[in-house]
Amino acid sequence: MLRFFRRWHIRRLLREGLTPQQLRWLRERVPIRERLLPEQRQRYDQIVHVMIERCPWEGCEGLVVTDEMRTLISGHAAVMLLATNDFYFDSVQAILIYPGTIIRNREENPVAVGEAWSNGGIVLSWPEVRAIPHYRGGRNVVIHEFAHHLDGRDGEMGGSPPFQNPADQARWNEIAAAEFEQLVDDSRRDRATVLDPYGATNMAEFFAVASECFFERPSELRQEHPELFEMLELFYGFAPP
Ligand SMILES: [Zn+2]
């Protein structure tokens, strides 16, 4: 019954379109949408619409979730699903939005701009989401946290995301380990890298940072790290234009 309702609901949503205001927000504030080919953009808009309507949005600390928030967060995440045909982040249990930075009672990292929990929750700071188009280095907290979520779909959020083919998984593990070592070394020596040095924290952060770079700076990543680019292209099912 639930499966039937899901199918019916999604079919209905796919026939509808985004509102002019939602399209304006996406055009002005999600640069990646503008780079897509027209046929990709059509599918992208459908994914955004389904996510806006179906994802479990929740405001925290008194924040009221607005259409603008749902549109921009869906707009940044939808590009990751461009090659899938019936998955709309249904596995995300809650998208929690905070009005400021997220205060955690943890010593090593007491504040955060986003988090992804192994139980399927995603936490985002709204000011950080709003700042995405202004970052020069390709930083994107939405892609980062949704990448952690995809990584954890096999039960473990450890930087080895679930590939369909086990041989590809093994190849990813091998290439990612070598690239990670390189990034650790580069950041120790203060060498400039196309990948955010935060990726040198651990393998999970490496996958999240590599995903941000793949979608936000595809040509630089392809140029500097062709093998890593190729594996991400295999995982996400297409190469971002
Ligand atoms: Zn992270």
Image (spheres, rainbow, N blue to C red):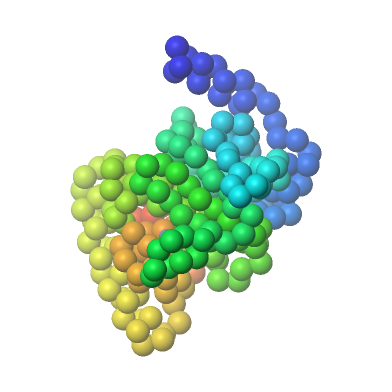
Relative to 1, does residue 208 appear above or below in the rendering? below
Q: Nearer the viewer, residue 206 or 129?
A: 129
Residue 85 rendering spot, x and y as whole percentages? 47, 32
To which quarter of the image does residue 29 belong? bottom right
Q: Is residue 52 visible?
A: yes
Q: Is residue 135 above or below residue 156?
A: below
Horizontal side, residue 235 vs residue 145: left or right: left
Q: Residue furthest right?
A: 20
Closer to the camera in the image, 101 or 171: 101
Residue at the bottom extreme, as displayed: 189
Residue drawn where x is 54% and y is 65% of the image = 139
Q: How many marks?
A: 0
Q: Residue at x 68, y 43 (%)?
A: 64
Furthest toward the front, the residue is 105
Percent position of residue 44, x then y:
59, 40
Q: State left or right for residue 116 relative to residue 78.
A: left
- Quadrant containing ligand 1 reads bottom left
| Quadrant location, the C terminus | bottom right
Image quadrant where one finds the N terminus: top left
Residue 235 appears in the picture as rendered? no
- Name which residue lies at 58% across and 39% down: 57
Find residue 225 and report its horizontal and vertical position in percent.
38, 68
Q: Along the horizontal axis of the image, is 134 left or right of 181? A: right
Q: Residue at x 43, y 51 (%)?
A: 116
Horizontal and vertical percent position of residue 114: 50, 57
Is residue 82 placed above or below 201 in the rendered structure? above
